[in-house]
Image (cartoon, helix red, strand yellow):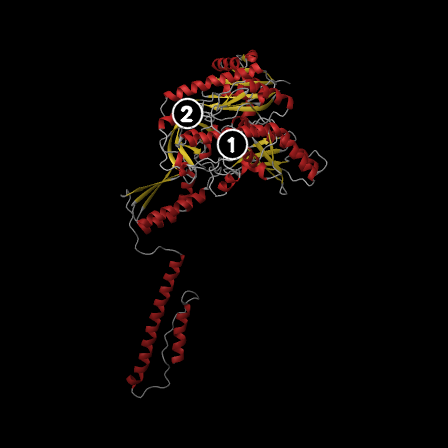
Amino acid sequence: MAKKMLIDATHAEETRVVVVDGNKVEEFDFETVNKRQLAGNIYLAKVTRVEPSLQAAFVDYGGNRHGFLAFSEIHPDYYQIPVADRQALLAEERAYAEAMEAEENGRGRRRNRPAAKAEKAAPADAVTTSDDIPGMAVVDLREEAEAAEAAAAPAEIEPRAEPAAEPRAEDSSGEREEPYVAADHASETDDDIESVADEDVAEEIRTQRKPRPRKYKIQEVVKVRQIMLVQVVKEERGNKGAALTTYLSLAGRYCVLMPNTARGGGISRKITNAADRKKLKEIAGEIEVPEGAGLIIRTAGSQRTKAEIKRDYEYLMRLWEQIRDLTLKSIAPAPIYEEGDLIKRSIRDLYSKDIDEVLVEGEKGYRAAKDFMKMIMPSHAKNVKLYNEPLPLFARYQVETYLGAMFNPTVQLRSGGYIVIGITEALVAIDVNSGRSTKEGSIEETALKTNLEAAEEIARQLRLRDLAGLIVIDFIDMEERKNNAAVEKRLKEKLKTDRARIQVGRISGFGLLEMSRQRLRPGMLESTTAPCPHCHGTGIIRSDDSLALQILRQLEEEGTRKRSREVLLKAPVAVVNFLINQKREHLAQIEGRYGMAIRLEAVPAMVSPDYEIEKFKTATRHVAEVAAPVVSVDALRMAEEDEDAAEVETEAEDLVEDEAEEVEAPRATGDGEPGRKKKRRRRRRRKPGGGNGQAEGAPMQADAGD
């Protein structure tokens, strides 16, 4: 069944685009007014800070945060160095571009190693550094503003480059021009990791440049308040500002224009057919590209005629002229060029010969799609049609239900299994479970079938949700290695149609498969959701009893500070009920111990773990501070022991009085009466416990005295 592109532009706040194959959603993209895409936009920016430790500059381009501009992304036109040195650097870059182009023609799609490129680009002479020139003259800043025109006609001189070994020695010094990201080089450092995806947009638009030999440091050639024309490479995300570059690129439907990158007549590495490459090479050679600029023919132009490619190139050149004119009239920071809205980007990047019609819901969106299609592909303008039926477009093709399920982390499989997608700060974790899938004859067969089906669904979900970064998939454990290989093969086949750059590893002994995916746009969940105000994005909240105990500890801590005479606690209803029913006595103890009145207020709108404690210097209810220690189990026992000790002292006094009476009795009778018995005082014996040893010891000593 033929594919269709559906565009929902009925609401100005949000535009959605899907590509459906029958009733299955293959591609999905959307854009909201609050979060428009920044990648690809061009701004006139001003340097606000140069950071030598990072070898980077922070620039104000008008965004929410200052952008990050690495030293390797700064064109030599912006270096404040003598003109001769700048011309030498430009000549070196041109020589490198020519060498890289020659190697690509000789090796086809085989990737070249940086060392081989350096050898081809390295003649004998070395560029004179700024340190070798005493009293180096600094170029006027007005000349740097004119450099925003991207060096349309730099002076021609003989290429002079550093020897190939020198960059290696400089690179090994430990300083890097930009942070090293392991995921970006995984396929180069590990043979088990393979780079897949037929449509690698980033590699087509932004050519890979070798690290420039470290002749200068950024603090020597870039100054604060310097004006630059920059392009956004990576979106702002979290606390990180946007990543910027001064190497501009303008993407069209069939080719990419790089106004200040000396590379002409390039062909996308994704075009592997030898006949197509030869034909496109001839077409690119016949197009007159200005000196200092570059042109790359994209994968979409592999089956196009010379007239179509040339028309696309002329459109990009007119666009570049408009950017130059606006730049010279603007004051930094200022926006110069926007990549275009979602409708234009979708037609440019997603539309192909497999799509037989483009249905647009919304009059304004239809006019925009029709006009843009007429401009870049006039012969296909008839395929753009306005949808104006009563039933909404996405509901008509049963897309709305599928898109609604994308907010659910669990995705059901046809066999009865399911996958669970968990997004964390470090990586995206995907777990595969067999669920109710029990139709196969053995556990191994059930695991294999579920894993194969999950591999297909995971490849689709990565595209639809735009899950990016490091991704770890926990497949169901399988015993035979050939089954693991079959799952790896299925996953790579389904990922080949992805437009992002993807690197896939192999299933490890733990049953885990690691892969990385390039971020093309802000993710769906990131753009359409907000953190929960109660759990703050964690997904869990504290239990009522745990929160109540935490509140009691904080109330007691406030009492020890002796700064408040009264506090008002506002907490959820369940927490206040727990405090009143279970901890009433403890609250009274805190009040008596510190002389601080405590008032409780249940707020139905509050949800755990939210609570609020208001402190007052004066009290509406006076609470006297108790001087005695707080009554507790140990205190009660100590009081009991004190009472026993007092009774023992009383008994000892009585014993002394009895002995004194016995001594005085013979004196009173004169001759004495030996047969008369002594009077003994009968004492009550206490029950065992609490100071009993002392009470029993006294009578024992009295008997011994007798």
Secondary-structure class at tag 2: helix
Determine which quarter of the picture holds residue 44.
top left
Residue 221: x, y in percent?
40, 34
Picture disc at residue 148: 2
Determine which quarter of the picture holds residue 394.
top right
Residue 674: x, y in percent?
36, 86
Whether residue 250 is situated above or below residue 53 in the rendered picture: above
Picture disc at residue 231: none
Amino acid under label 2? Ala
Q: Nearer the viewer, residue 634 or 558?
A: 558
Q: Nearer the viewer, residue 281 or 174?
A: 281
- Label 1: how many residues lie within 10 Å, few (<14), some (14-19) or many (20+)? few
Among the two numbered marks 2 and 1 on one chain, the one whose residue lies closer to the N terminus: 2
Picture disc at residue 209: 1
Q: Residue shown at 40%/73% (left/top)?
A: 697
Q: Residue furthest left?
A: 618
Whether residue 485 is situated above or below residue 7 in the rendered picture: below
